[in-house]
Image (cartoon, rainbow, N blue to C red):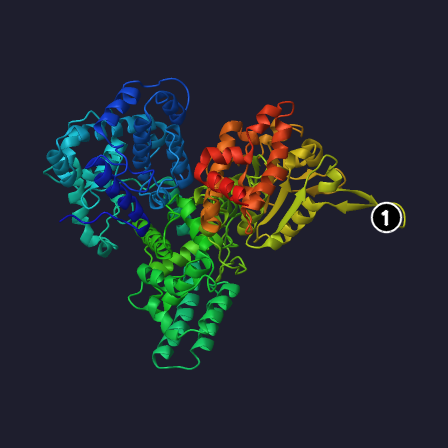
Amino acid sequence: MATTRIPFPSARPVYHAVERWRDHCLLADGTLFPETGLFADDDIATLANGEALIGDYVEQPDTGRGDFLTKLHGQLAESPSGTVRLAAELLYVHLLIARSSAVGGQRKLELVNSVLHMAGFTAKIPKDLAAALDSGLINPGQGFNSLRWRQFAYLVEVFTAIKRLPRAERTATLTDPDAFVAFLDGIDDQSAWIQRYSLEHLLFPDTFQPVVSRDHRRAILQRWPTTGGSESRRLAAVSDSLAPNTVWADQGFVNLYRAPHVWEWGAIGERWRTLSAWAGRLLETPVVEAERADKVAAAAALRQVREGIAQGSTTWLDDLRKAFKQANVVGWRDSDTFLAWLADESPQVLQELWTDPGPESIDRFRARVPKAAAATTGAFLSIAAFLLSAVDVTGFPPWRAMAVSSALTRVGAAKPEPSATDGERYLVFLVFLDQVRDLLARSGKPLADRLDAQGLVWALVNHNPPADWSHTLAEGFLAWRDGKKTAVDPTQEEILVVPRTTVDAVTVAVEPEHDLADLAAELYLDQEFLDEINVLLKDRGQVVFQGPPGTGKTYVARELAKWFTGSPDRVHLVQFHASYSYEDFVEGYRPRESGGFVRVEGPLLRLAEQARAHQDERFVLIVDELNRANVARVFGELYFLLEYRKEPARLLYGDTDFTLPPNLYIIATMNTADRSVALLDSALRRRFYFVDFLPTTAPVSGVLRRYLADHHPQLGWVAEVVDQANKQLDDPAVAIGPSHFLRPDLSEQWVRRAWKHAVLPVLAEHFHGMPGRLAEFDLDRLREEVDPAGADAVAAGAQED
């Protein structure tokens, strides 16, 4: 029997969704998205609908301009509703394979819902199927998005070909992996390899590997030649042969894109090579030994606590508190909160973690620890990883959210899916450490264990460059760590020969751990969206959030800045307005009560001075409503400093040169709906990255629906009303944002208040002189369109009153 291919718990919803598709839609003629909640209520997956989709889509290709979805809408504009619903269900299946880093969960849902709405579909996608879109298996490559039309056309042809088979032959084909591969061999794939190999794996995950690149498959088979059977069967044989030598073979998954296999068949990528080079330079210093010694000592203290609990110690809690303090790998607020909860519990609760320790025991422990004791993934995992060191610190090293995220980003490694369990997140980290060890071993600098790998990774993303490095080398290292391109070659650059016995390290304030996944969940945004902003901010130093009112630009800016800096004390917000000036923002002269004038620093200079005094910390200046001021006048010589941060400039009222500290970042917000405010000139646009916050586009388009599902499920119709209104507006710059309804005390009464006093006044201004248009956005009228049953119930209640 072949080795199972299911890699992580977060992948299981994907496989369950495919099983449902196979049973209800391929073997039977049912539907994935029933309108009544019964999967047999509609015959959507029929041969007739498949044939119609062949005629309307496959045989009528749109070769003009426009994206896939726009063209699909045009091609299916005259198709029957059943055919359109089938297209939506096949599009859902097509999107399942992609990890959220390739296509975010909210974007997937947006694409499927867009097609469903064409068919007049009024029900919701079943919750478990919608949740499966937040998961994914692989990064399917650029062609998955750029050639979606081709992949989708192939999927339509495969579906229809299956439906043409007699029932007995269809069943045999869909239950025998080799028969299925032979069946696909008879269909012209037109180079839609991604979709073909995705189908093979999704329908037979216990047999076929999730490798969808044709070039990669050939490289793997060239490295490990096998004979007999199809290419996919031979690839499965390779996986089976490697299983006994794979670290995670006991979980039954061989990942050919991870150590020790990936660099056997593929070249080591540039980002991994660069990490190896910088790691090699740090290994010339005592950094790893110093990191190891501290953690081994802390683990020894924790091991004594564990032994004391086993012997019935009455001081175990005090001893545990001392161990946390000694280790300094968990934020003191987080450890205090956890220990306060643990004081009322039996110490045996820790056995959930220490028995059969590993990722699964972390999830068992999470089930015992309430949110009040460890509110975030970051807090909980830092605690759990530290406690695991009582069992084996060399196998279960410390975990810190920011460090792990930074390290994975530097090499482009896959991060955990948003739906990943805490145990899975830790497992991804351990797999990464194993890959770092494999990388260093290949360069002749082996590490003893995962603890050494963790210490090295921590130093790479947190330590200052050693003092004996040359300025060029140190600058290159810091630039690499911030994700910037550098011409410095760590293996060639000479360093000053200065005898040293210690390594300078950044004094890192241990703040409460907050993983980016935690922040994404709190903001109801896709993690990859925040990841992208994080990368952009570190690369250029300044970004602009642009969109209409109510999209959460300012709120997200403040929350992201607190996460980015690690403390609200290092975040400052200013709001621009029409009379805001350079003197308000940078510096200027103000009259004194005693007469004369004194030079006063503005918020920019004050925060710059703080940043310069604390170069080991990040600071963020938030500029709200950037385009309401005359930006060119307010910024002045900052135009130059934003682009050339290392070069000095003389300020307007200053008598010394000034540089903008590299650890001072700027997040600005800009309202795109108010067309009366100043436009930004091209010089400023060249210095900022711009991020769209549009209510009609993922991930913002899904915020309200997710928030209501969590906090006010009875008001889910509000999200449908907002979507319908935005569809009628057909103007993303003035679309209605979710923030009007993101309040804990939301009720139907508050929805009506927000609509009357916040939404309609903006629309009235937009439709000035067109009163007929404003009437289209009456709340009751919109609700009747999207939720007729709910609207009728409200009307009936009003009549009874």
Q: Could you say which is closer to the camera, residue 210 or residue 258? A: 210
Q: Secondary structure at mark 1?
A: loop
Residue kind at label 1, given as amino acid type: Arg
The residue nearer to you, when weighing 231 against 150, is 150
Q: Is residue 428 visible?
A: yes
Residue identified by numbered label 1: 592
Asked whether, in this view, residue 557 is left or right of residue 204, the answer is right
Asked if residue 284 lies left or right of residue 498, the reply is: left
Foreground pick, 412 / 704: 704
Q: Residue furthest front?
A: 800
- Spot occupied by residue 21 in the image (x, y as percentages of width and height): 25, 39
Give me the residue at 37% from left, 73% from top.
303
Pointer 1 local density, CA inside 10 Å: few below 14, some 14–19, many at least 20:
few
Q: How many marks?
A: 1
**Residue 386 sits above or below residue 659 on the image:** below
Question: On the rendered image, what quadrant is the C terminus found in?
Answer: top right
Residue 252 vs 627, above or below: the answer is: below
Whole-percent x, y for residue 50 in the image: 24, 27
Left or right: 469 as drawn, with respect to 602: left
In the image, what residue occupies the spot 58% across and 28% down?
Answer: 775
Residue 516 appears in the picture as rendered: no
Residue 79 at x, y = what percent?
Answer: 33, 22
Query: Is 566 above or below relative to 740?
Result: below
Name, please, the residue furthest toward the left. Answer: 228
